[in-house]
Image (cartoon, helix red, strand yellow):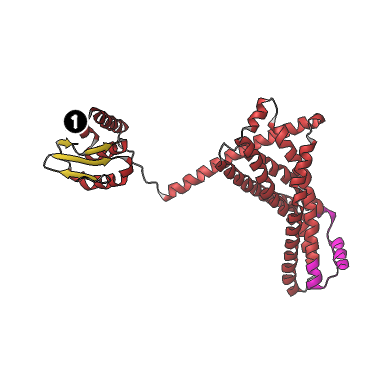
Amino acid sequence: MTQTHSIYLRDTDTTLSIEGEWVLRHYNDLQHAVRQHQDAVTSTKRLDFSKLQSIDTAGAGQLCRLVGADTLIQLLDEADHLSDERKALLKTVANAIIEAGPPPILKKVSTLAQFFGNIGSSIQSFGKNAVELLGFIGLTLQSMAKVALHPSQWRWNALVQQVEETGLNAVPIIALLTFLVGAVIAFLGSTILKDFGATLYTVDLVGFSFMREFAVLLTAILMAGRTASAFTAQLGSMKANEEIDALRAQGLDPITILVIPRVFALLISLPLLTFIGMVSGIIGGALVCYWVLNISPTMFLSLFQEDLTITNFFVGMAKAPLFAFLIAVIGCLQGFKVSGSAQSVGEHTTAAVVHSIFIVIVLDAIAALYYMEMGW
């Protein structure tokens, strides 16, 4: 007796009996049955459908796989106990399989070829992203010039709000992080310099490193992770909700309304946060010098003023506006590239953080080499 949820194939010398339910919900059972009987049906000259309960396109596809699409079309004309509708279904599926042809044979790619292919794809993607970034920078600079020439277009409320979000709210984390890093630098420096009897130079190490590099670099990296991602998420959500398209439909420029306030806010916030980072890092180093090396705050400030010039301060601060501009532009660009899905928002938010941190570190390294060659 045929079970409702099982598939049976019975072979005789020339007749193949198709039984049970050849439908999608039994697809795994069908595959197993077809594999078992595929080699035994080469001499089939007749199909018996008398005990076939039901069949759909999934079952028809498996039947074509069992006897072959061409053979199935030939045998259907003499098949028993098969309605015209089911014959039409089987012929349609068989003809579709014949027209599609055999599946393409994929050549196995060597590991070396795949490696160089990935390198080429990465270079191509890098070039595409660089061109997009340069184009968006030009568009942003054009809008900034237009806003500067027409002060009535300034959105002061949005600017103040963005300064609060990107700058004021970031002060605690910037101050805490740079304070701790300053303390660590002073402690490590004093540990090494103590062996040479040069512990006083710990003051120079802390001041030099924070004024030139660590303050602006740490602040920029934190802002890349905190602010660039926020810009991308905000603009990406607006893009997904078609709010940006609505602005364009009203004849408004999304760059002027959405990007320019964020760029100017970060241009204001990042230099101020860099200065706070310098002060916090130096204070952290001064406390370690006081507790570990017995260098009083007065002596620390005296050595600081004698050995470090104002040039070191300006070298560090000069990089802050450039980093701020690029972080804001990258964050906004990735926001505009978001498509309509939540997954796209997450992908471009990650891309904004990665690209911002990468370009900040690369430009900082280039600036360090330039200042060294210039003797600044």
Residue 131's spot in the image, x, y percent?
A: 61, 37
List the residue tagged with mark 1.
Answer: 74
Which is nearer the eye, 374 or 340? 340
Q: Circle 1: is it few (<14), some (14-19), or many (20+) Cα within 10 Å?
A: few
Q: Residue placed at 65% from the left, 25% from the top? A: 249
Does dot 1 land on a helix, a strand or a loop?
helix
Look at the image and tell me whether residue 323 can be seen.
Answer: yes
Name which residue lies at 62% across and 48% down. Answer: 354
Eyeballing the image, is 210 above or below 110? below
Q: Which residues are magenta?
A: 287-312
Q: Judge whether 282 appears above or below 369 on screen.
A: below
Depicted 200 relative to depicted 310: above or below: below
Q: Position of residue 275 (x, y in %)?
A: 80, 53
Q: Is residue 251 magenta?
A: no
| Residue 20 image point, x, y percent | 24, 42
Q: Camera-side residue: 232 or 82?
A: 82
Left or right side of 204 for 26: left
Q: Residue at x 47, y 44 (%)?
A: 117
Residue 285, picture quadrant: bottom right
Q: Is residue 376 visible?
A: no
Which image quadrant is residue 78 in? top left
- What's under tag 1, amino acid-wise? Gln
Decide whether residue 303 is among the magenta residues: yes
Question: Residue 337's x, y, as percent?
Answer: 60, 37
